[in-house]
Amino acid sequence: MDTITLQLFTALSVTSLLSQRVYGLENGLARTPPMGWLSWGTFRCKIDCVNDPKNCLREELFKEMADILIADGYYDVGYEYVNIDDCWMSRKRDQHQRLFPDPERFPNGMQGIANYVHDHDLKLGIYNTFGKTTCMGYPGSQGFLEIDAKTFAEWEVDMLKMDGCFTPVELIPDGYMDMHRYLNATGRQILYSCSWPFYEKLTQKMPDYNNIAKYCNMWRNSMDIEDSWNSILWIVDDFANNQDAHAEAAGPGHFNDPDMLVIGGSGLNVAQSEAQFGLWAILAAPLLMGNDLRKVKSEFRDVLLNVEVIAVDQDPLGKMGKRIFKDSWHGVDGWLRELSNQEFAILYFNRNPRGKKLFKTSLKKMSLPSNHTYDLRDLFLKKHFGHFKVEEEFQVTLPANGVKMFKASSCSLPNNYKHDGL
Ligand code: GLA
């Protein structure tokens, strides 16, 4: 190499190293929030295949879920990840310290499922914990991060959910950053889902979301979701109370995760299901279903397959929406998300558990700029709602514990408009 070439080579290497450090996460994944299904919501740690073969975490179950994603139209609207949560492993590592799946439940190894899922044009997600054991007591990745990253890559895994049970909080940031590096080093694109901020919050430590966003494609902010309305309320309020920090860190490649969709289980009615779906879309949240796909009734499937709400969730601008007002007198909250093409998603959320609520409002209350007119489309009824000047009052009818969600398209916004509050 002559001197000039050598200098150029060194300069390029330094630049590439620097850019690697600054843009470490830019692994090209999660440009919009990931969509799919994961086992924890319904199947938890069910491993008794003798007495409960239909609900046992094993190869057949995941293949069945993959089949339903395709047969019932989920894949067509964007759900593509089949994610295996806790309890897939053998209780011990092999003689090379590698993890391996329970051989009775996964007779063809993880590669067997990966092949099946990939043959169906779907993607495979897997789970482990940065700690000595997983939350359910299986071998964790602490001390084995590099081996585990390589193993997952060899199995052709597409996503890793890295939990943080039983990990001293001071080890958490470095552990998650190290795993990010090992995943990148495998050369395989593996979407990295972290529970980093949640475990910091548990010890009252304020997470540095902007740093987390450099290393993780998505991250769990709050406690585990349950299949109940109270659980949704708790998570939504937690997000609203921390929304500035959450929203600043969100964007294409890195999203906040309020946890699974519980729609299609037994805890939510249809109005509450629309509320979860609409709110998750406003939050630019991953849409990972935790239901039993075999048992989802058609009215709930319709919610999960609502392409207009999914389009809000998947909007390429990737901005997280915020709660703009909380009207405690009426029990109604107003949420707003800025979309690309100068559009907005608007959501009115009725906290009242009984009866319909007629709520009078205006777009001014959403802090949209005055002197403009918007066309509102009702995203759950899938029809035009009306044209309104920002100051003009209109009335929405909200179901008990339900939402009204609109896409607002400006008839007159200037090209360079930016909403100050978002
Ligand atoms: C934690 C996570 C859950 C699930 C379980 C599995 O509680 O937050 O989402 O993965 O562990 O043990």
Image (cartoon, grey):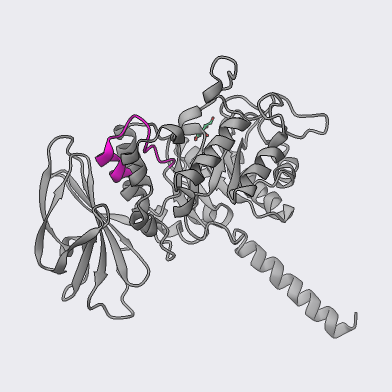
Left or right of 141 on screen, residue 306: left
In the rendered image, residue 133, in percent from the top left (x then y), is placed at 63, 28
Main SS of the magenta part reads loop
Task: Quadrant for residue 77, please give it.
Answer: bottom left
The residue lying furthest to the top in this view is: 51
Residue 85 visible in the snapshot: no
Identify the residue at image location x=59%, y=43%: 125
Identify the residue at image location x=64%, y=26%: 138
- Numbered circles on residues, count: 0
Residue 192 visible in the snapshot: yes
Q: Nearer the viewer, residue 356 or 146?
A: 356
In the rendered image, residue 298, in percent from the top left (x then y), is placed at 34, 39
Left or right of 223 on screen, residue 386: left
Q: Nearer the viewer, residue 75 or 262?
A: 75
- Which quadrant: the C terminus? bottom left
Task: Quadrant for residue 127, please give it.
Answer: top right
Identify the residue at image location x=27%, y=35%: 269
Identify the residue at image location x=71%, y=47%: 153
Q: Nearer the viewer, residue 210 or 377?
A: 377
Left or right of 279 on screen, residue 119: right
- Which quadrant: the N terminus? bottom right
The image shows residue 312, relative to residue 182, as above or below, that is below
The image shows residue 244, relative to residue 134, as above or below, that is below
In the rendered image, residue 136, in percent from the top left (x then y), is placed at 57, 25
The image shows residue 307, relative to residue 90, as above or below, that is below
Read off the magenta span: 259-276
Left or right of 194 on screen, residue 353: left
The residue lying furthest to the right in this view is: 1
In the rendered image, residue 264 lying in the magenta stretch gets the answer: yes
In the rendered image, residue 130, in percent from the top left (x then y), is placed at 62, 37
In the rendered image, residue 312 lying in the magenta stretch gets the answer: no
